[in-house]
Amino acid sequence: EQREDFAVVIQPFFRNTLVPLDIVGKPDMSFFAADCFHFSVRGYAEMAMALWNNMLEPVGEKQSYNNFTQDRSKLKCPNPEKPFLSTRRNSEFGNSDLNLGSTESSVPYWAAIVTAVAGVLVGSL
């Protein structure tokens, strides 16, 4: 928040996403790889579009779901008035004078380590 040349912005496009369904109401497996866990090319394309759109949406107005429509027209283009990726500072969201040094993380440091190790173990299986 204090720097003008670097920002970290949460992109919530996957927060409220549901598994896409096929025409009979079952999970649409065309979005998933053979292991039924990772995305297929189709799934990655949908996630890439949702991530791109989220990066262009102002902080506080970001879409928190993906509707899996395969509709390329939903891909957003940069706004001529704001031709950059949206950050808290350039979205004018909240108080830009916020002192982040005094805030505490709600996640303990060891949780990131445990999650990383678990991810490596699951990935190796």
Image: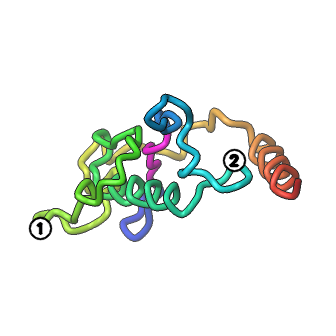
- Quadrant containing the N terminus in the rendered view: bottom left
Disc 1 packing (10 Å; few <14; some 14–19; many ≥20): few
- Residue 103 appears in which quarter of the rendering? top right
What residue sits 29% from the left and 60% below the top?
Answer: 72
Q: What is the tally of numbered marks visible in this picture?
A: 2
Residue occupying the point 44% across, 49% down: 11
Is residue 89 on the magenta stretch?
no
**Camera-nearest residue between 113 and 95:** 113
**Which mark, residue 69?**
none
Quadrant position of residue 77: bottom left
The residue sitting at 28% across, 51% down in the picture is 57
Q: Is residue 94 above or below residue 30?
A: above
Q: Nearer the viewer, residue 108 or 30?
A: 30
Residue 10 in the magenta stretch? The answer is: yes
Look at the magenta stretch and give its main secondary structure.
loop
Residue beneath disc 1: 80
> Mark 2 sits on what residue?
36
Q: Earlier in the sequence, mark 1 or mark 2?
A: 2
Magenta stretch bounds = 9-14
Q: Secondary structure at mark 1?
A: loop
Q: Mark 1 and mark 2: span between their CA atoms?
A: 40 Å
Q: Amino acid at mark 2?
A: Cys
Report helix, strand or loop for mark 2: loop
Q: Residue at x 56, y 36 (%)?
A: 27
Q: Is 40 on the left or on the right of 80, as rendered?
A: right
